[in-house]
Image (cartoon, rainbow, N blue to C red):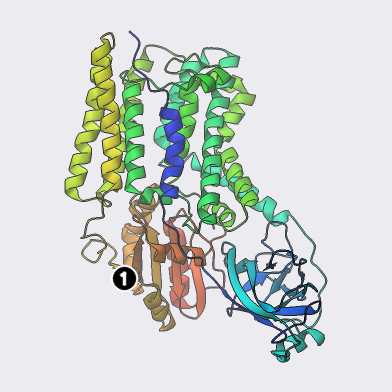
């Protein structure tokens, strides 16, 4: 008897990758430069040339990229002048750049610092009527410091240009600076640094390595169990089937990463918050993914069949039956969905870089991460004979398939734990009932598949229960008791307070900050194996380390800005504030040895100035 199917499940998986991100409300851009503009005279005669100066005052410790940046992937500073209809275009003169040397890049960067002046010249048309004209100016820039490049910012200013008889000079100190060649923090134009793509290539390599390591992260392991089962099943079907299945999985992974990249680009363009894994802050997304896992569990148990839409399934050579290319492609999608709450060595650096750059760079780095995650399957497609190392198919596979279903069910239970921090206990109980209803209606439909009316009723109940689960979660609010740590055993955590952490470090104390979330599987592994270890607890007590925990389970822009300032967009994130030294940033995968070494050296004053763990940072 043919098992019931839902051909849109794969498409819904792609929508799930983007739904939570687009639900994030817009957030004000972080501006590190103050922009204002002035005209040279109080009035200009028709046919005369008018000049405008834009003064950009950049925050101390920050710089913005020059109009001609050192690297292709950096965002240039651009000034645009909006003129009345029919007026000739204005010309813009940019100041000479300053060569700024970063400790992370061998070549100096062309930047603007401090107070920088940009000049625009425009010709007032001879036939212009005497009137006041509003001239709009738009400045786009990217601000960076030693640690991080922020997303590009677009800001505006306006001046009033009066056309009539020639007026009086004004703001001569600003316009005189141009004549003296003093338009910024440099007296002359330095040689333009070489435009190298080395740093960009390095980030692509970091993305590939980080994506490859993602396959070993705990959040992806349940999906890998699915892949092991599928590979064993196809191992005896011949070279063509093995290659096709591996390519279908790789395609599912790459399409998922492209969807993530395009969504991040769109949300960032709208001023929204972007980051790796932040969709898990949305209870609606967590509930959606829980429903998807339940569907996969039911598939493993023979109650629900996942099929591709006919067009896509035909393109991949799917037979349209349960396993086939649909199963491989779907597992690629699910692997990416499950990977997003995990961070890995090199991944945080690559994603942080990608989310602070232009759209092309963001898409390229996300593609590199997708390629890295898909590398094992691409390798299998190239060398399908390696599938012979797997055990031969047999009756034991039915037992394995059922066991894999329970492993996925365990992952769904973990997602319910995540939801417990995002919705009230009563709403969570109702969600569990609706999830149980999903399983009930799937079972019912498998029993009445030959009865048209019964099958339609069961299908309607199945869809209704799934929609009810997601809708109920999306409308939930976090429990009121969330956010206290002092009464828990082990390290005595305090709620995160950035100002207090910096003040305590300035006063001579060590402060350890842990940015974590219930949906971050890597965070939980680090807590269990490292931070809850007796040696670390004793270390913190002996040296009086103040431990602060920033809980990012739910949306918190304060924490997001904190991560941005360190150039990070993903968690886990660990930093140790040290008296008289820059903060030390640990890698995503903590070890007891690294924590002990850094804390001991910081407490005894024998530490050097390094601020990032080189192995994983």
Residue appearing at x 50%, y 19% in the figure = 310
Task: Look at mark 1 in the image and give the residue it sits on.
Answer: 541
Q: Is residue 434 above or below residue 402?
A: below
Of 372 and 430, nearer the camera is: 430
Left or right position of 27 against 427: right
Residue appearing at x 24%, y 34% in the figure = 435
Q: Is residue 285 above or below residue 174?
A: above
Left or right position of 114 against 344: right
Residue 1 percent location from the top left of the image: 33, 7
Residue appearing at x 59%, y 56% in the figure = 353
The quarter of the picture where the C terminus appears is: bottom right
Is residue 616 visible in the rendered structure shown here? no
Residue 426 percent location from the top left of the image: 16, 47
Left or right position of 157 against 299: right
Left or right position of 216 against 608: left
Residue 381 percent location from the top left of the image: 61, 25
Of 474 and 586, nearer the camera is: 474
Q: Residues within 10 Å of mark 1 (few under 14, many from 20)?
A: few
Residue appearing at x 22%, y 24% in the figure = 440
Query: Would you identify the image quadrant in which residue 416 lies?
Result: top left
Residue 189 percent location from the top left of the image: 81, 76
């Amino acid at each position: 008897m043919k098992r019931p199917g839902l051909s849109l499940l794969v498409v819904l998986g792609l929508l799930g990758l983007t739904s939570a991100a687009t639900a994030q409300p817009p957030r004000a851009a972080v501006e590190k430069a103050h922009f204002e503009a002035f005209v040279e005279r109080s009035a200009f005669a028709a046919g005369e040339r008018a000049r405008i100066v834009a003064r950009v005052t950049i925050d101390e410790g920050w710089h913005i990229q020059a109009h001609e940046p050192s690297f292709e992937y950096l965002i240039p500073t651009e000034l645009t002048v909006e003129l009345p209809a029919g007026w000739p275009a204005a010309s813009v003169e940019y100041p000479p750049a300053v060569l700024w040397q970063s400790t992370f890049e061998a070549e100096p960067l062309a930047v603007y610092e401090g107070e920088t002046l940009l000049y625009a010249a425009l010709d007032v048309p001879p036939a212009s009527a005497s009137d006041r004209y509003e001239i709009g100016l738009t400045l786009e820039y990217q601000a960076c410091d030693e640690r991080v490049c922020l997303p590009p910012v677009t800001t505006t200013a306006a001046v009033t240009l009066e056309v009539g008889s020639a007026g009086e000079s004004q703001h001569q100190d600003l316009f005189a600076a141009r004549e003296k060649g003093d338009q910024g923090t440099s007296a002359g134009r330095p040689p333009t640094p070489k435009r190298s793509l080395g740093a960009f290539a390095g980030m692509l390599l970091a993305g590939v390595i980080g994506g490859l390591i993602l396959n070993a992260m705990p959040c992806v392991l349940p999906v890998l169990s699915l892949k092991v089962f599928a590979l064993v099943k196809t191992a005896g079907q011949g070279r063509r089937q093995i290659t096709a299945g591996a390519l279908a999985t790789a395609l599912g992974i790459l399409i998922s990463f492209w969807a993530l990249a395009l969504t991040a680009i769109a949300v960032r363009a709208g001023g929204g918050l972007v980051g790796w894994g932040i969709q898990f802050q949305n209870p609606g997304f967590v509930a959606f993914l829980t429903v998807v896992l339940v569907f996969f569990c039911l598939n493993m148990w023979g109650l629900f069949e996942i099929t591709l839409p006919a067009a896509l399934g035909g393109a991949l050579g799917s037979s349209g039956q349960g396993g086939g290319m649909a199963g491989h492609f779907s597992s690629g999608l699910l692997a990416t969905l499950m990977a997003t709450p995990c961070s890995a060595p090199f991944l945080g650096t690559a994603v942080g870089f990608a989310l602070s750059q232009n759209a092309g760079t963001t898409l390229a780095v996300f593609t590199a991460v997708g390629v890295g995650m898909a590398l094992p399957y691409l390798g299998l497609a190239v060398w399908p004979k390696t599938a012979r190392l797997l055990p031969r198919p047999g009756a034991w596979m039915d037992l394995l398939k059922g066991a894999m279903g329970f492993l996925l069910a365990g992952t769904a239970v973990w997602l319910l734990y995540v939801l417990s921090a995002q919705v009230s206990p009563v709403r969570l109980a109702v969600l569990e009932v609706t999830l149980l209803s999903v399983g009930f209606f799937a079972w019912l439909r498998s029993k009445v598949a030959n009865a048209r009316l019964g099958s339609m009723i069961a299908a309607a109940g199945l869809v209704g229960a799934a929609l009810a689960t997601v809708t109920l979660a999306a409308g939930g609010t976090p429990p009121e008791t969330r956010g206290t740590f002092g009464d828990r055993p082990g390290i005595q955590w305090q709620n995160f307070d950035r100002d207090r952490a910096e003040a305590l470090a300035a006063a001579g104390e060590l402060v350890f900050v842990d940015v974590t979330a219930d949906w971050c599987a890597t965070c939980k592994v680090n807590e269990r194996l490292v931070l809850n270890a007796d040696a670390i607890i004793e270390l913190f007590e002996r040296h009086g380390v103040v431990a602060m925990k920033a809980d990012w389970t739910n949306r918190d822009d304060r924490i997001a800005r904190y991560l941005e300032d360190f150039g990070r967009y993903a968690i886990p994130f660990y930093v140790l504030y040290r008296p008289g030294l820059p903060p030390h940033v640990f890698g995503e995968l903590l070890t007891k040895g690294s924590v002990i070494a850094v804390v001991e050296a910081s407490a005894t004053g024998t530490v050097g100035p390094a601020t990032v763990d080189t192995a994983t940072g």
